[in-house]
Image (cartoon, coloured by chain):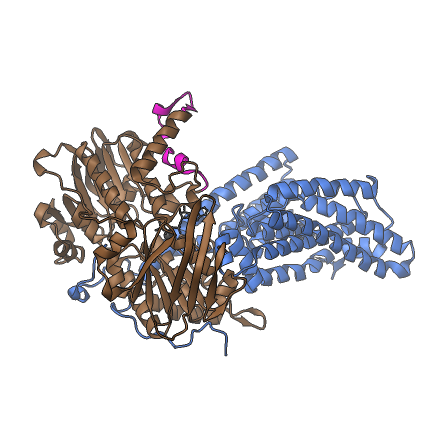
Chain colours: A brown, B blue
Amino acid sequence: MTATVPTVSLQEISKRFGPTLALDAVSLDLLPGEVHVLLGENGAGKSTLVKTLLGTYHPDSGQILIRGREVAHHNPGVARDEGINVVLQDFSLAPTLSVLDNLFLGRQPLRRRLIDTAAMREAAERTRELVGGTFSLNAEVGALPRSEQQLVEIMKAVMGKPGALILDEPTAALSEKEAERLFGIVDRLVHQGWAILYITHRMAEIRRLGTRVTVMRDGRRTGTHLVSAVTDDELVREMIGRDITAVYPHKADPRHLGPTVLRLTDVSSANGKVRDVSLHVRSGEIVGIAGLVGAGKGDVARVLSGLEHTTSGEVEVLEYRTSRPQIRKMLAAGVGFMPEDRKRESLALQLTTADNINLEASSSKAHGRFGFLHRGQLREAAISMIRRLDVRPADPQQEVGLLSGGNQQKVVLGRALTRPRKVFVVAEPTAGVDVGSRQQIYEELRRLCDDGVGVLVVSSDLEEIVGLSDRVYVMHSGAVCAELVGDEISDEAVIAAAFGHGADEPTARVQEAV
Amino acid sequence: MTQLQEPVQQDAVPAPETTAGRGRRYWFLKAFATAGPLPFLLLLLVVGVTLVNPVFLSSSNLSSVATQSVYLLLVSLAQMLILVTGGFDLSVGANVALTSVTSALVMQSVYGGVDEYSGIALIWGLVVALLVGLVVGLVNGIGVAVLKVNAFIVTLASMGIFTGVTMLVSGGSEVSGLPRVFTHEVGSGRVFGVVPVPLLMILPVIFLLYVLLRRMKYGKSLFAIGSNELAARVAGTRVGTNLVMAYVLGGVVTAYAGWLLTARVSSGQPQLGAELAMQSITAAIIGGASLLGGRGSVGGTVLGVLFIVGLTNGMNLMRMDSNQQNIALGLALVLSVLVSRARDRARREVAVMELDQGATPPAAGPVGSLPEQRNPLAPPS
Ligand SMILES: Nc1ncnc2c1ncn2[C@@H]1O[C@H](COP(=O)(O)OP(=O)(O)OP(=O)(O)O)[C@@H](O)[C@H]1O
Ligand SMILES: [Mg+2]
């Protein structure tokens, strides 16, 4: 390294949570003008490192230097004054406050000792344009969709004092368009001499943005490399300790597919995001739904789970037919769900891993009588599920809110797997999940198919759609605009369809496709 | 891991414009999300009661509604302040009783029946009342923010403790012999023959609380603490200190109400304000505050109190008995919670509609230059 003083320097930082040594003497420099990517499995300690930098966690040992000076009593206030701006992996906005109030929380410009709203608005409008948000600054943050909330978080960070920007999986909830915009902002900040720490599980982003990459494993730093001097395979090996030959499992043999287990006929949703969608899933196949954010793919899953009302059309699961899906009836009919927004829609964060895995099982008759639960049985079930999905730490009594992001995702999947199903509807199954675990999750889904289940996967990850699906529906502004089978499924074909290639008349193509 | 990347020809495809102009539904939802149902309900109440009994709108009745509202309003504002932080305060009634008794004792002994000492007695009474409020608030605040005990438990306990202290101090009996200025002017005086003095005496408090919550950093940090403590912490807020200050402020405002109420009833009373805890929570919730924290406003609370007092007054005028009145108030509370849920939905819908509205996405590709090298927020160097 050159003689530049690192904007931030961590030296031999250790942090223990009970039995878990989350950080084990980790050292890391953030230089002005670099994008430093931090790579590591779920639970490797990345977010813990970020929170230490931010000052919400205090290291058990080690030092933090900011611009060469040691910080004695680190806390978020100090971090902010020193220009350390952080986008946390978890939601850190106040949902009942307006966008504007959130952006300037604790640092409102004052005029005669009162908050200068006009000045706030002016500065915020400029930055909103920069990140490409279209939300109203008066909107309550909690009322916005998840992707817009993420934009607000990013706005908040880049509006801070210049210095360092730390992004913990910022693209997990963003569409490709917004992500690209974020990359643009990162480029620009780097150009201005900011130091950026960027955490991601997406290898492509390392190539797109990174200057250097540091790999972490089990709380230790295993190495730091120039991005140009290392291959993806080397990084993966260093990160998970083994080679991954094939991330995606085999595909289904089209001749051995079973009967149709899920069918949607001309379904439209009340919010207008799903328009006359018809599709079906057969037993033994994985069907992907692709499309840009806002194309309505997530809304299809929400319609099926009853979170979004239908205005017309019909849904069929085996013998069960309905024009208004309700979650309880759908579950009873044999559908399993894995929702997109794990924090808001599926996890009970204060409960333990075991309780969360068993949340659905304990409401079924199999595990108890007269409302009493068979505790031993439930515990066994939870432990075997934790092992099957490699949730870490493998402690069934761990509070789920304290698990790392990717491990929370595995718990959600684990819950869906506790009951035998005929159909699975999974949305963004691997958001925030590391490469190794991703492979396990794909294998798990494929195994279900081999046992005769039909799986519907909604995903914004193109590689996942192409690698995993036996058949793909592509959506464009609420309608299915293409259906691709077998060899037709390729990056190019999906992209072309998703961008509405020839989509002036999307409905015409629906009929053609179905 | 590769996400869908934007192909080059994308520019050629026009973004689908989903909406054309803001419809009536949008404006309706927007009005509902912003103002809530209270203005409408109040209007309904006024019209309804007046049709049955026109006395409702007479200046003497309105003035008495205003007087009755004053005390509940102060306490409800204090309650709202605590609700905003995500806690609540069951000890407001005990606070009122204690301030009533102690300030009355002090005023009685300073005054001693000598009219020249009325003024100084008044001031001493107020100072002691506010000090008592400060102590009560401090106890609650330390329990909640430093010892980190649930607000329900802390204020339930302090309610018991301070009720006990009140009984010890007063021996369970009324404290009379208060200055005439206090009981007649502060208690039930009128300016220009119509405007009640106590109403004038709380206007500055209302104004200050309004400015505090809307225009001061401290107020915003209270909302943040109640809404998402992590967000507040990350913003560098000293959560504990701010919480203690909120409880102290709430205690002092409540004590002020206790002092004013003492003037109204002309003596220090150990039983004063027993019903205030429930009433103030009801009023604040109807006025838009939430037990989950992060919500509440001065304006909403004022309307909430007017609604409750107006409804009670109206029911009196319509000769409904107290049982019927209790049922009606209970229903109003439940209804208000249901309505607030609908309001949340309206907020979400409006936010999304506004998203679509703003759909003139700036050109794709790398963003234009950052506005300036120096950040707009960086302190001037
Ligand atoms: N507050 C806490 N209490 C107890 N354990 C914790 C706490 N925070 C983190 N851990 C544990 O520390 C380890 C590291 O977690 P961390 O969140 O840093 O992982 P991560 O690398 O960010 O993973 P992911 O990619 O899934 O986000 C995990 O085993 C996690 O369970
Ligand atoms: Mg993490």
Name the residue located 42 percent from the left edge and 65 percent from the top edge. A9
- Name the outermost residue toward the top: A370
Name the residue located 79 percent from the left edge and 40 percent from the top edge. B167
Relative to B189, does residue A345 appear above or below in the rendering?
A: above
Q: Is residue B237 left or right of residue A122?
A: right
Relative to A69, does residue B311 appear above or below in the rendering?
A: above
**Pick the front one: A188 or B157:** A188
Q: Is residue B80 left or right of residue A25?
A: right
Q: Magenta includes A354?
A: yes
Asked if residue B171 can be seen in this view, the reply is: yes
Q: Magenta includes A234?
A: no
Which stretch appears magenta?
Answer: A350-374
Asked if residue A272 can be seen in this view, the reply is: no
Query: Which percent across, then down, holds residue B344?
Result: 44, 49
Q: Is residue B251 left or right of residue B110?
A: left
- Name the outermost residue toward the bottom: B381
Name the residue located 57 percent from the left edge and 38 percent from the top edge. B330
How many discs appear?
A: 0
Query: Which percent across, then down, holds residue A33?
Result: 34, 72
Query: Which percent across, then down, holds residue A329?
Result: 30, 31
